Amino acid sequence: MCGRFAQPRSSEELARIFHARPAAELPEAQFNVAPTDQVAAVVEQHGERVVDAFRWGLVPFYAKSVKDGARLINARSETVETSPAFRTSFRRHRCIVPAEAFYEWRRHRDSVTGRTVRSEPIAIRRDDGEPLALAGLWAVWRDPETAQRLYTCSILTTGANELVARVRDRMPVILDPGDWDAWLAEATPAEELRPLLRPAPMELLTAYAVSPAVNNVRNEGPELLDPLTRWADGL
């Protein structure tokens, strides 16, 4: 699962990195993105690649309420082709969600009760400092009362690699730059997409403990990505 991430770069910078055009006004630098927040995603529309704004939490076109999207922040790669909520988007509406890092939590449990007594947030990012290209899906939902359109997205997950598995058994699908074109192109057949839904190589990533301030979604700022060295014991 991916339930929180950082997206501090501007739409102009993301457009340069992903060879796209900024198409919408996006939020300022975000270091603690949470479900239902507005995020930047890279999509291809009518043969043009753009960086646009989406609400995190996919609302399927058939949903009766926008509240349904709060539960669909992630799509499992193992079932994305058959899931009613995601299969149409997987065929035609794929996107890339850029992220500086995603957060997971290392749980410390009481040896007697098994209850969690402390949770340490861990930032996982590329070792070379480049942004992560998270494989995503997008959809358009129309409000039945106002006819207003809402553009939403979800992040695909897969089994964790050896690094992420130290804190979590799932991780986002991270696309190689050489796979961006195939992932974004609407005409790419499913048999070419399936091999992309794999864990990223362990050596691509680095992981380290960060401030527990990340635990509160109201907290923001670049300091949330600073290493908290006193807790970095063996990641």
Image: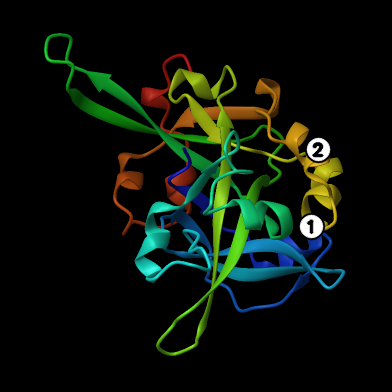
Q: Nearer the viewer, residue 42 or 19?
A: 42
Query: Who's the residue at 43% across and 22% down the image?
Result: 232
- Residue 161, located in which quarter of the rendered image? top right
Nearest to the observer: residue 28 or residue 57: 57
**Residue 34 relative to residue 117: left or right:** right
Question: What's the distance in space between the residues labelled 2 and 1, CA to CA?
Answer: 24 Å
Residue appearing at x 83%, y 47% in the figure: 189
Residue 196 placement (x, y as % from top left): 75, 36
**Type of the residue with mark 2:** Glu
Crowdedness of circle 1 by 10 Å Cα count: few (<14), some, many (20+)?
some
Label 1 sits on a secondary structure element that is: loop
* Residue 26, numbered label: none
Q: Amino acid at mark 1?
A: Phe
Question: Which of pointers 2 and 1 lies earlier in the amino acid sequence?
Answer: 1
Residue furthest left as drawn: 113
Q: Is residue 97 visible?
A: no
Residue beneath disc 2: 191
Kindly give the residue lying farthest to the top in the view shown.
112
Which label sits in the foreground, 2 or 1? Answer: 2
Q: Secondary structure at mark 2?
A: helix
What number of labels is visible? Answer: 2
Q: Residues within 10 Å of mark 2 (few under 14, many from 20)?
A: few
Residue at point 64%, 66% (across, down):
10
70 relative to 135 in the view: left or right: left
Find residue 46 and report its horizontal and vertical position in percent: 84, 73
- Check the image and name the residue furthest to the bottom: 146
* Vertical arrangement, residue 174 with respect to residue 217, above or below: above
Residue 60 position in % (x across, y down): 51, 63
Residue 231 vs 85, above or below: the answer is above
Residue 18: numbered disc: 1
